[in-house]
Image: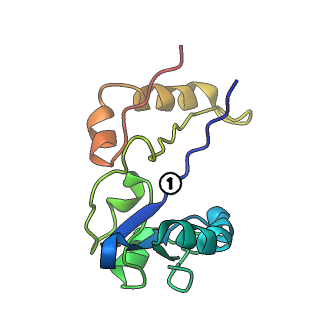
Amino acid sequence: MKLKVFLSLVLSLVAGIAGAADVRVLSSNAMREVLLEIAPAFEKASGHKLAIPREKYVQAKPGIQTGELVARGEAEICFQQLSELLPVKGIEYLGPLSADVGHVTVFAGGIHAAAEPQAARALMQYLASPAAAPVLRAKGMEPAQAAR
């Protein structure tokens, strides 16, 4: 089995002199140190200059939606699940990432051992029913699929 790793970077190219460009890079923390180390070799080989947004990178604290940072002017762009962006007032949703770099999160339900199983099962079935589909879509989610 071949493992494929997808790296999503947001790159903004600004045309420069004689075909050279400034490449503004926004990356995850995992890639930041790699990019900082390879930047000199890349710049020498390609003639392009990397601008890596290190001093401008803001990570939301636990419990804070990234969209709230944008709404307050603390960030210019954010990446978050659509269902978590739609309720934030004061931001403009630009659209999804392309399929080759976007990520779909699949949520699953389970019944806790101490729960009332019939009631919990009824809730999960309702979430998978056609009645819940319009609400899910309006909140940026796809309808649930019932377990088979």
Check the image and report above or below for 15 versus 73: above
Above or below residue 128? Residue 57 is: below
Q: Which residue is mark 1?
A: 8
| Kind of residue at badge 1 | Ser
Of residue 71 and residue 55, the one placed in the foreground of this image is 55
Image location of residue 10, percent across then percent down? 43, 62
Q: Position of residue 129 (x, y in %)?
A: 36, 25
Q: Which residue is situated farthest in the top direction here?
A: 148
Q: Residue at x 45, y 59 (%)?
A: 80
Residue under the image location 67 percent in, 35 percent down? 115
In the picture, measured across the screen, residue 128 lies left or right of residue 53, that is: left
- Look at the picture and state if 79 lies above or below 132: below
Horizontal side of residue 2 vs 81, given as left or right = right
Circle 1 Cα neighbour tier, 10 Å, few/some/many (<14 / 14–19 / ≥20): some
Residue 65 can be seen, yes or no:
no
Residue 69 horizontal/vertical position (percent) = 43, 78
Of residues 76 and 10, the one nearer the viewer is: 10
- Give percent across and percent down for residue 146: 47, 21
Position of residue 110 in the picture relative to residue 88 (left or right):
right
What residue occupies the far right of the structure in this picture?
A: 113
Q: Locate residue 44: give its quadrant.
A: bottom right
Q: Secondary structure at mark 1?
A: loop
Residue placed most toward the observer, 131 or 147: 147
Residue at horizontal 27%, vertical 60%? Answer: 94
Q: Residue at x 41, y 64 (%)?
A: 11
Q: Taking the image as drawn, is residue 70 in sight?
A: yes
Image quadrant assignment for residue 77: bottom left
Q: Viewer-proximal residue, 147 or 77?
A: 77
Total numbered badges shown on the rendered structure? 1
